[in-house]
Amino acid sequence: MEAFYEELCKRMTKDGSILREEPMKKHTTFRVGGPAEYFVTVTSTEELSETITLCNRYDIPWYVLGNGSNVLVSDKGVRGVVLHLSGEFTQYEINEDIFKGKAEAVAGAGVLLSVFAIRIAKKGFTGFEFAAGIPGTVGGAVMMNAGAYGGEIKDCITKAEIITKDGERKILSAEELQLSYRHSILTEEKGVITRAWFSFTVNSKLYILSNIEILSRKRKEKQPLEFPSAGSTFKRPDGNFAGKLIMEAGLRGFQIGGAAVSEKHCGFVINKDNATAADIFALIQYIIKTVEETSKIRLEPEIKMLGDFSV
């Protein structure tokens, strides 16, 4: 591992960084998680590709973390490398064509959805309002086809650049990304989104910003934003709603350790009182078991589990 570390250090630019045994609770919205063996911030596509290639050569597992908003990291931490995208990955560009009434935009995988959505809106283009309140990055959103309030990434994306598990750069069309409900080709084949291209249409700036404000109020009214969480904990089952099934199972407010089912919205598991990742994981498993017993429907977690959760 020391040979790997020394070679990794040689490949990093002055803007990149390598942290050892970095607490992941500092990088996840659940505010839990043990240390990452290596927490590596890369600032360019070349640096990312070289780091992945190096990990593969030394047989070191690697993972990519965006804003940490859709992940639960084990209290035991993560062995291997956790990659964080910065530098060129946090840049975006919007090209307007007023005569055609549309805009083409490209955003790096590390760009915050909220920042990008507001910028698009202030330019007078519509189609991304749904993303303004999603606490994630463009890369994570494309990977899982994030959506809210009737909108999804697949509605406006045109193509994306990825780094494959072997370190190769590729451009995939929207069709090749195979986007469906909380799914893309990268949920099955390991790789990294580096940037994505989108298309938006022109509309009244006042209307667009007003729509974002309406959606923001809905979130504040219906979601437990005052507690650390990873957003919606479970995927929506066909023809039903996870929150409704959890409530009907009598689990509103149910708590294991410091983790609880939100009383405001039962579809959210929250870190209510200094929860551990083990508390949250145990509660998720209990919810799945109880809902299946009461409704014969098995819920599937929307959040990704990273690390070892065995007892």
Image: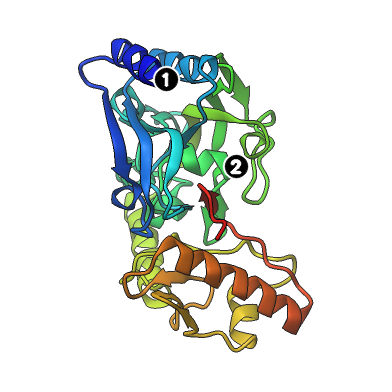
State the mark number for residue 173: none
Colour option used: rainbow
Q: Which residue is more in the foreground, 57 or 299?
A: 57
Identify the residue under disc 2: 154
From what the image shows, is residue 125 above or below residue 284?
above
| Quarter the N terminus occupies | top left
| Element assignment for label 1 | helix
Identify the residue under disc 1: 48
Q: Position of residue 146 (x, y in %)?
A: 53, 49
Q: Which residue is more in the foreground, 304 or 132?
A: 304
- Taking 206 as reference, is 51 left or right? right
Q: Position of residue 269 (x, y in %)?
A: 47, 70
Q: Position of residue 300 (x, y in %)?
A: 66, 61
Displayed quadrant of residue 5 = top left
Q: Residues within 10 Å of mark 1 (few under 14, many from 20)?
A: many
Give the mark nearest the N terminus, 2 or 1. Answer: 1
Q: Residue furthest left?
A: 14
| Element assignment for label 2 | helix
Q: Residues within 10 Å of mark 2 (few under 14, many from 20)?
A: many
Q: Which residue is more in the foreground, 250 or 264?
A: 250
| Quarter the C terminus occupies | bottom right
Name the residue: 30% across, 33% down: 20
- What's under tag 2, amino acid-wise? Lys
Residue 202 shows in the view? no
Give the foreground label among 2 and 1: 1
Name the residue: 44% across, 13% down: 50
Name the residue: 70% across, 66% down: 237
Displayed quadrant of residue 17 = top left
Q: Position of residue 18 (x, y in %)?
A: 28, 27
